Amino acid sequence: MITPSESSDSGRQNLAQAITREVFVFDGAMGTQLNNRGLPFDRCFELASVENPEWVEAIHKEFLDVGASGIHTNTFAANSFKLGRHGLEGRLQELLKAGVERAQVTATENTWVIGAVGPLGVEIEPLGRLGRKEARAEFLKVIQVLVDSGVDGISFETFSSSTELVEAVSAAKEACSVPVFAHLAVNREARTMYGTDLGAAVQRLESAGADVLGVNCSGGPRMILNAAREMIAATSLPVSARPNAGVPRQMDGRVFYENNPDYFARFARRFLQAGGRMLGGCCGTTAEHIRAMAQAARAVGAQERGAPETPRVVSKEAERPQKPMPLRARSGFGRLLSDGACPVSVELVPPRTPNLDALRQSARELKAAGADLINLPDGPRASARVSNMASATVLQKEAGVETLLHFCCRDRNLLGMQSDLMGAEALGLRNLLVITGDPPYQGNYPDLTAVFDVDSIGLCNIIDNLNHGLDLGGNALDAQTHFTVGAALNPTALDAERELERFAWKMEAGIDFAITQPIFDIESFESFLKALPENAPPILAGVWPLRSLRNAEFLASEVPGVEIPNSILEEMRRAHEAGTDQECGLEIARRTLESLHGKVGGFQIAAPFNKVDAPISLLEALGEIR
């Protein structure tokens, strides 16, 4: 093994040279040791550098005493987003500096001090709301403080997303000249948690300028060793491996790991024989695990250590996106959009029970009246109903009508989303309206949890990938999907600038159309349309035939995104007094159709309470307008 004093007279300044030549053993799990000292897992571990400095220093010393040649600062979760969950975002610089200071106080002249940086804890584009520029700026802010405080290198650890890790590495190479370690968290198939092939991730990280590549966390020694071997075969850079101490178990409220240090020693030997260069531990690893690896590393002589294989060439051709099918060939709805034919969708809500007879009959009547497709919400208002995917399958097969499937982010994780999307393609459900989804507290079961791995923008990007023949991780699929994809557009948003910005992101994600909330203020909506980009996709205006004054007041007061002018409410009040609520509501909807025909790309007509008489009347009226 090599230490700063052994590498050259200039000590720590030559880490960049040392990592290409020798074996390193780094420390183990800071978080595990803090928890063992009584700090709960839901607390901010980085705060211990200020409030319990003696604990942090003692942990560093324990690892150094058993043979670690480098230690990581207690700064893994020190970024504005993760600290913000504890109300500590204003103390970012303080905690970063304190983490470095605790390590430096403990370090000897033979110790490398590495700045630990973890993921931001929020999704970045294309899956999340945080832009790549904003993510890189946050990483820059963290890295600059660590480097200014005197770390010898930067180690990015436990990154599930290669996209986020590339941004982190790029930020580090922009900010400093110290070596940059880039660690991915992988699954048992040696892919990232988003399914990205390890070889493809290696290429991206090499291009970003990483000095060391590695895998850490996510599994025990065997799993990490298998992934490390694959990484060694894919790169000429030094490779680091930092496994967990096996699978965590709980007893009496305490978390513990069963893997013994001898097992880690065997892992260390095999890793070095495979051509690996840097060892360490992640979750659950103690000083005894590091001692075992350090002893094994010293026992493996230079002759026994494997030379890295000649990196295999990872084919970029296999990952090249396919050209999406033309819009007009994807579905009947896609053809109508492409031809500018003003398609009309009618919304029917799936029932609360598995009897679909009424839904099927309503769909048949609407098709006969001229509806181009039936729009099926996905658990609207956070309510439990028959799957809209099952409903759509029945309607397309038994009622002979095309469907538009709402697809929301609330109830599925990313794995479930991709599975259901591929299932929809297999069932011939080609039209999707992507929405983030109503939170559970708005529904019948307010205590239920929501997933929201991504929002509607992220989901649009996922679907765009699938339409290009790429999965969630950017890996090529044998067959692409052929979805016509739409998104929601809120013309009455309080923050119109933000709504237009999000709509621009949805356009970048490849949407083919947008649907608005019900429109009642024509003049305001027309002004909003003028603010849209010239290349905006077709906009389907929402039309809601009010059933009663009570229905109007409910929409105006309790449904987000719906604004009903006082003039409309007053018109409904007069009609209510005359006992003509439904007739008045229908007339208001007819005026909306007449005013907006030719100004929008189509219409979505609601069927309040799944009553189809009003939508059928509006379809007949629209036929006359056309």
Image: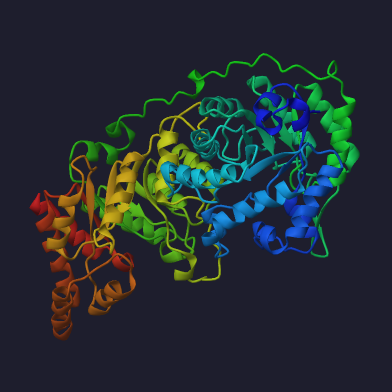
From the image, which quarter does the N terminus lie in? top right
* Percent x, y of residue 140: 50, 43
Say which of 110 and 508 sits in front.
110
Determine which quarter of the picture holds residue 182: top right
Q: Is residue 535 left or right of residue 111?
A: left
Determine which quarter of the picture holds residue 158: top right
Does residue 192 appear anywhere in the picture?
yes
Q: What residue lies at 67% left-to-right and 13% top-to-bottom? A: 310
Compared to residue 77, the image places residue 279 above or below, namely: above
* Percent x, y of residue 87: 54, 65
Q: Is residue 236 left or right of residue 301?
A: left
Q: What residue lies at 77% left-to-right and 44% top-to-bottom? A: 28
* Percent x, y of residue 439: 46, 64
Report the number of discs.
Answer: 0
* Percent x, y of residue 100: 66, 49
Q: How is the image coloured?
A: rainbow
Compared to residue 225, the image places residue 93 above or below, namely: below
Say which of 544 and 508 sits in front.
508
Say which of 3 and 327 sits in front.
3
Q: Is residue 533 left or right of residue 375?
A: left
Does residue 402 appear anywhere in the picture?
no
Q: Residue furthest top?
A: 310
Q: Residue furthest front?
A: 9
Q: What residue lies at 83% left-to-right and 40% top-to-bottom? A: 290
Compared to residue 532, the image places residue 591 above or below, namely: below
Compared to residue 302, the image places residue 44 above or below, namely: below
